[in-house]
Amino acid sequence: MKSSITHRIFFALLIATGIMVISMALVLQWSVDRGFLRYINRLEQTRLERLADSLERSYARQNSWGFLKHDPDSMSRLVATCLSDTPPGRTNRMPPPEPPPTPEQARRLMRVEQRLLVLDNQQIPVYGTASTMQMEILRPLTWHGQTIGHLGLMPSKNLSEIHQLQFVTQQKSAYALVAVIMLLVATLLSIILARRLVRPLRDLAAATHALALGNYDVRVRADSDDELGRLSRDFNALALSLQKSEQTRRQFIADISHELRTPLAILGGEIEALQDGVRPLNQTAVSSLHGEVTRLNRLVGDLYQLALSDVGALTYRKEELDLVELLTGAVERMQPELQRAALTLTASLPHQELLIYGDSERLSQLFDNLLGNSAKYTDAGGTVAVSLACQERQLLIEVMDSSPGVPPGEEQRLFERLYRVEASRSRTSGGAGLGLAICRNIVEAHEGTIEAAPSPLGGLLIRVVLPLAEQNV
């Protein structure tokens, strides 16, 4: 069974915290061992001073170290008295006899005696077998200002007494208990943090699954400024984009179905009328059928051009062109159609050549579509004006016409596929609302921009901006 990301984050936090807690506990235990051992050695050095005082007084009574050589038990008595937790007061008399030590006390005294070393004033050992090299401190023994010997105690390397070991064990147990409590707290905090950290990811996963199933209305909360917040906002933007794309796709299918159904219905009705003998088969009937077929061909051709442009398969053979010459040719070609529509065409074109790097066929198609759009949707007796100017290393082409205009705020929607302003600029000549969409693709392929705005003449203004060729820059 695959673990979820919540489990992974939980175990990652728990393992990291556990390693830190265990490491801290081990360091503390090591510190207790070392620190307590240093404390014991310092305590023994303090008690060593009392033993040194007793040895000095004993030497004064004997005037020699012979009592250590002839009576080895005397050192045991001194050690038992001076290194005990309750030593007698400082007197010149020998300490009174004490009860026999317990086995544990005897072992403790033995361990201390094995680490003791007494030297005379000639540095000759008089008691003990330890080496002077093992002594950290040799305490001088003096009497009446003269050095009579040295006393040393080899420091302990390990804890050996029961009460010392019990104390260290208690401390370690306390540290272990604290470590366990910290691990339990860390476990609880890891669960809370893991769930809190994963909650946005879980919401994103659920929303992504819903989006994959086609629910484009899904959104996620984006109330943070971190990476997850940016990811949530990007997801919402993606869902909104997909929602709009889906709405556009459905609208496109509905519109194109309507556009295809209308001429097909007309063709079907006329053919049935011819078959039933309701309408005679003459030149008028054939021309009507031919007109509907032409309209279908134009619609299918526009769709094909638009589809090629969308997938990047629309070929462009770019070269250096004189845009003035190209626009002049488009004006001359469209002049008869505009005259038939009872429209006046004015052109304001410069006399010098303006070079552009582009495809002459596609740019001609662009200008023909723009002028043809004005011819279709401008009322008879109106005006169509074309101008070309060079501004800041760019070419500005404007095609404007007279009324009717476009409702405010609807100008940029003219470049949407199959969009028409039915109220005023209706398709009296069979336009399908694809011409300006094709124009936008052609302009963008030439690294330019196209936009629509209200015309000073009362109709629509189409503004195209194209970059100049390097020779003009």
Image (cartoon, helix red, strand yellow):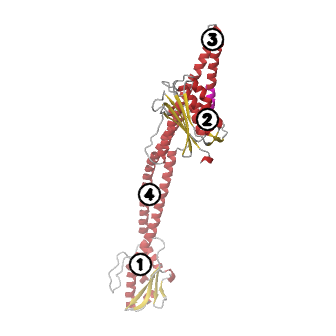
Give the alpha-carbon distance from disc 3 to disc 4, as whole Å.
94 Å
**394 or 243, nearer to the observer:** 394
For the residue carrying disc 2, how many other residues have a C-alpha within 10 Å: few (<14), some (14-19), or many (20+)? some
Residue that label 3 marks: 272
- The magenta segment: 299-306
Quadrant housing residue 299: top right
Residue that label 2 marks: 328
Residue that label 1 marks: 45
| 2 or 1: tag closer to the N-terminus | 1
| 4 or 2: tag closer to the N-terminus | 4
In this rendering, is residue 311 above or below 117? above
Q: Is residue 444 magenta?
A: no
Residue that label 4 marks: 179
For the residue carrying disc 1, how many other residues have a C-alpha within 10 Å: few (<14), some (14-19), or many (20+)? some
The residue at 64%/10% (across/down) is 274
Residue 305 position within the rendered picture, expressed as x and y whole percent measured from the top left = 63, 31
Q: Main secondary structure of the magenta part?
A: helix
Quadrant housing residue 100: bottom left
At mark 2, the secondary structure is helix
Residue 116 position within the rendered picture, expressed as x and y whole percent measured from the top left = 46, 81
Q: Is residue 469 left or right of residue 239?
A: right
> In the rendered structure, which amino acid carries the disc numbered 4?
Ala
